[in-house]
Structure formats: structure tokens, C-alpha cells
Image: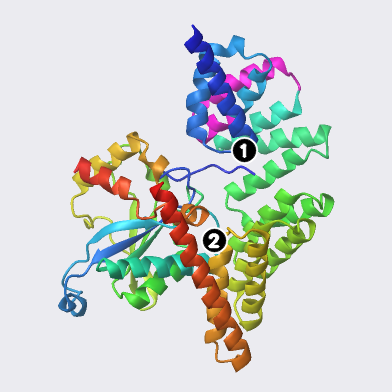
């Protein structure tokens, strides 16, 4: 009996951790969550509802419509008329590729609550799923005019632009993110990658600076370290730079190489522990 | 924002694999038209944005070095797109493929057709493209491009059932933590075990 109780608590804690860390390990969530729901539902208290939501989304990822449907029914019963549950119903329709029905579902949410950002973002996700990148970009831009502070949306837009090879606009999105999150090393590093990809001496120098900045913010960011090495090396090798600039960049590249080698040595040592 | 995860090989949405092939003599290089290239391993690269240059260059450089140490050559590039229904080569695939073809003229570009993926792996779901006159042409899918498809099918299916993809390491994982080994020795061992 004690074993059963501790299993339940352990699994519940795991699910909570995955929720908090925003992990998308859907197969594991389904494995753990399904058992928890089937065997221990009555003993989970109010946690059960958020668990139903978490398991439902994971079930959609794993094409487990049976499980998703079960979770959805429980949530509908407990929270009739809830917008949050309506959105989950919409997501299930998306998973079944019933995009028109899903869109109608989100439209009905928006009719009751035009500021419901979740429903608007799901509509954009539908466009993305259908491969309608230009429309997704247009809708997302419109969304951002209204909801200027939505970081997730700016980041999504930067990715959409990158996939369309529109690096200039992707850079703009990342600039917005860096402005509002000056200590975020990931945005710095991604911006540097976009600049590097754009190419040309000026962009390479900018990219090197932002790789360096990302490193300053987090000296364990390996992408920033490699990026610093690559950009400095390319600049040093460029026929367009003068001797001083070349010398400086060779120095940066050498420094980066040493740091990279050290990082590998440290990681091998840790492997052996 | 959620979008459906479509790739078979783990939680990755766009695993990219590069095929390496073994070259045993200089002569093989000259007359590679007559001797078929055998790809003996593959290395998954990224599962995020593919269209950015720096990390791709880093990956190709490190893999190329490793290949030379092991007497291999990078012989191709494999890509699975984020959207299941999207199985045509895009600009990224063509560019990377062309880059690899610069160093190895017989390079192949391989696209995964996720719509035909099954756990049983009974049919090959790869479309193989060859580089001719700066264009990529799809090989006739009726031509057998596999050394031993039956064996490959059995092994792949077993690996999928055993969820070996949960331990698959790609280059992105390596960049997140250098201890993650993109040569996937454990999975290679499992493959040999199942042979």
C-alpha cells in the first residue's frame, strides 16, 4: 500500500516538475499521466485538473486521441463554458487536422473575449501548420501591433522570418527582444547568428560583437564561443581588412580556440567522474 | 506555441543526418562513377532553426575533422522537415547538399517522407537526390539503394520499439552540453547487437 502511495506522489511530482520546466517530453508524460489518471484520479485532489490538461496536450503530441478525448471530457464536465477548455478542444481539432473546425472554435472564443491572446496565437499556429508562412507572418505582425510586449510572439516571428530567409526582419525581432531583455544571453547569441548569416564584413563584425556580449552574459554559452571563433576567423581572413583589424581578430580567434579547447577538456574530465 | 512534432527519431522535429562513406583507396575517388558509394553512418545535426549559418559551419568542420581521423568522408546530407506533408528539398537542403558536393562530387541529398513513416518501417521512406549540373534530381525509387533493406528494416523497427531515440544525441545537444557525444556510440552498439 505504501508503495502505491509513494509511486503516486513521485509521479505527481514528476509531472509538476515537467510542467514548471515546460518540458515537452510527451511520451513520458503520457506514460506517467495515463497511469496516474487511471489508477489514482480520486487521490490527486485539485491537481487532477491541471494534470488532465497536461496529459491531454501530451496525448495530442503522441496521436493518442483516445486519451486526449477522455481528458477533455473530464475538463468539460468540471469547467463548462471555460475558454481555457475551449482552447484545448480547438487544439484537439488541430491535431486531427480539422483546421476549419479548430479555427471556428477559436473564433467563438474571440467573439466572447476579443483580447484572448491564446486563441489568436492558435489561429496563427494553424496557418503555420498549413505551411501558409506569409499569412502567419502577416497575422503575427498584426498581433504584435496590439500586444507589443509578447516575447514569445516576437521570438516566434523571428523564427518564421529566419525560415523564409528574411534575415533583416528576423534581426529586427531579435533587437526588440534584446531591448526588453538585455541580460538574456540567448537572444544576443541568436542575433549574432542572424547577422553572421546575412554576411558581409559589417555584419560579421556586428556578429562577433554580439557573440562576445552573449559570452559576457553567460561564459558557458558554447554557441557564442564557437560563433566568436568563426566570425573573428572570417574577418581576419577577409582581404578587405587592414593589418590592425586583422591582427586583433586573429587574437580574438586564438583566444576563442583556447577557451574551446579548455571547455572540451573540462567536459572530458567531468565525463570520467 | 505548439506545433505537432513530426519526426520519428525522437523529440526532435528536424533531425538532420549526414551520411559518411568509406573510401579505401585513391583509385576509388577517380573512378567513383563505377563503384557505388556505401554510407556507413550518419550524424544528426539540428532540431531547431536550420537556416542559420554559423553552427552549421561549426558542425561540418568538426565532423569533417572527425571523418578524416577515421578515414571517412562526408558523402551526403539528410533532412526531415518540420511539417509532415512537406517532403520536398528546400533552400537549406539544397545549399548544404551543394556545399558537401563541392568536397565530394557524388554527394547525395536525402529527404525523409514522414507521411509514410510507420513503426514497422516496412518501406523505405527516403527520397534520394543526386547532384547533376547544379540541380538535384530525384533517384528512381524503384531502384534499390540499400545494402540490405530487410536487415535495416528489422533493426530500425526494433530500435523504434525500444525507444532508442530517447537517447539520440544530435549536434544541438552537444552544443548544449559538450559531454553529449554526437557519434552516438551507444546506439551504434545497439545496431551492431541487433545485426
- The magenta-colored residue range is A55-81
Tell me the SS state at disc 2.
helix
Quadrant of the rendering where the N terminus of chain B is positioned: top right
Is B78 left or right of A230, judged from the image as shown?
Answer: left
Q: Is residue A266 visible?
A: yes
The residue to which callout 1 is attached is A21
Depth check: A273 or A101 in front? A273
- Which chain is indicated by disc 2? A
- Residue A71, quarter of the rendered image: top right
Q: Position of A162 compared to B7: left or right? A: right
Location of the C terminus of chain B (image quadrant): top left
- Hey, which quadrant is residue A10 in on the image? top right
Where does residue B173 sit, x and y in percent of width and height? 48, 52
Cα–Cα span, label 2 and label 1: 22 Å
Q: Which mark is residue A222?
A: 2
Q: Mark 2 or mark 1, which is nearer to you?
A: 2
Element at label 1? loop
In the figure, residue A76 lies in which quadrant? top right
| Residue density around tag 2, few if under 14, some if 14–19, many if 20 or more, within 10 Å | many
- The residue sitting at 21% across, 41% down in the picture is B194
**Horizontal arrangement in the rendering, residue A235 relative to residue B20 (left or right):** right
| For residue B98, above or below residue A248 | above
Residue at the image position 69 percent from the left and 32 percent from the top: A87
What count of labels does the image hold? 2
Question: Which residue is rendered at x = 52% and y = 15% of the image?
Answer: A6
Q: Give the main secondary structure, helix, strand or loop, of the magenta stretch.
A: helix
Task: Name the foreground residue: A98 vs A27.
Answer: A27
**Reading the chain from its start, which is encountered first: label 2 or label 1?**
1
Chain under label 1?
A: A
Amino acid at each position: 500500500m505504501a508503495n502505491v502511495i509513494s509511486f503516486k506522489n513521485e509521479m505527481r511530482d514528476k509531472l509538476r516538475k515537467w510542467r514548471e520546466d515546460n518540458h515537452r517530453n510527451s511520451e513520458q508524460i503520457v506514460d506517467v499521466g495515463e497511469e496516474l489518471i487511471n489508477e489514482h484520479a480520486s487521490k490527486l485532489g485539485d491537481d487532477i485538473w491541471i494534470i488532465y490538461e497536461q496529459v491531454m496536450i501530451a496525448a495530442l503530441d503522441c496521436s493518442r486521441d483516445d486519451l486526449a478525448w477522455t481528458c477533455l471530457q473530464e475538463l468539460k464536465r468540471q469547467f463548462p463554458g471555460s475558454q481555457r477548455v475551449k482552447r484545448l478542444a480547438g487544439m484537439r481539432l488541430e491535431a486531427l487536422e480539422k483546421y476549419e473546425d479548430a479555427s471556428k472554435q477559436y473564433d467563438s472564443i474571440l467573439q466572447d473575449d476579443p483580447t484572448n491572446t491564446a486563441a489568436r496565437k492558435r489561429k496563427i499556429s494553424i496557418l503555420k501548420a498549413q505551411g501558409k508562412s506569409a499569412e502567419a507572418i502577416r497575422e503575427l505582425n498584426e498581433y504584435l501591433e496590439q500586444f507589443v510586449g509578447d516575447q514569445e510572439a516576437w521570438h516566434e516571428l523571428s523564427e518564421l522570418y529566419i525560415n523564409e530567409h528574411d534575415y533583416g526582419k528576423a534581426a529586427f525581432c531579435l533587437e526588440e527582444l534584446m531591448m526588453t531583455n538585455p541580460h538574456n544571453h540567448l537572444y544576443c547569441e541568436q542575433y549574432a547568428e542572424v547577422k553572421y548569416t546575412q554576411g558581409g564584413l559589417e555584419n560579421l563584425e556586428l556578429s562577433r560583437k554580439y557573440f562576445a556580449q552573449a559570452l559576457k552574459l553567460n561564459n558557458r554559452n558554447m554557441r557564442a564561443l564557437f560563433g566568436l571563433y568563426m566570425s573573428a576567423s572570417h574577418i581576419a581572413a577577409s582581404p578587405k581588412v587592414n593589418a590592425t583589424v586583422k591582427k586583433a581578430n586573429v587574437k580574438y580567434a586564438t583566444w576563442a580556440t583556447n577557451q574551446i579547447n579548455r571547455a572540451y577538456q573540462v567536459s572530458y574530465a567531468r565525463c570520467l567522474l | 506555441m505548439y506545433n505537432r512534432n513530426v519526426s520519428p527519431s525522437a523529440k526532435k522535429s528536424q533531425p538532420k543526418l549526414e551520411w559518411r562513406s568509406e573510401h579505401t583507396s585513391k583509385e576509388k575517388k577517380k573512378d567513383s562513377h563505377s563503384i557505388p558509394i556505401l554510407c556507413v553512418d550518419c550524424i544528426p545535426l539540428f532540431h531547431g532553426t536550420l537556416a542559420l549559418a554559423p553552427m552549421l559551419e561549426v558542425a561540418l568542420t568538426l565532423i569533417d575533422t572527425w571523418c578524416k581521423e577515421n578515414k571517412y568522408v562526408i558523402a551526403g546530407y539528410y533532412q526531415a522537415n518540420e511539417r509532415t506533408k512537406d517532403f520536398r528539398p528546400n533552400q537549406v537542403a539544397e545549399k548544404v547538399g551543394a556545399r558537401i558536393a563541392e568536397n565530394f562530387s557524388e554527394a547525395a541529398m536525402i529527404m525523409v517522407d514522414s507521411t509514410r513513416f510507420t513503426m514497422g518501417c516496412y518501406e523505405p521512406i527516403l527520397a534520394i537526390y543526386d547532384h547533376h549540373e547544379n540541380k538535384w534530381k530525384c533517384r528512381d525509387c524503384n531502384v534499390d539503394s540499400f545494402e540490405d533493406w530487410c536487415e535495416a528494416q528489422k533493426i530500425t523497427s526494433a530500435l523504434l520499439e525500444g525507444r532508442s531515440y530517447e537517447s539520440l544525441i544530435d549536434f544541438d545537444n552537444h552544443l548544449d552540453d559538450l559531454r553529449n557525444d554526437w557519434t552516438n556510440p551507444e546506439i551504434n552498439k545497439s545496431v551492431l547487437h541487433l545485426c
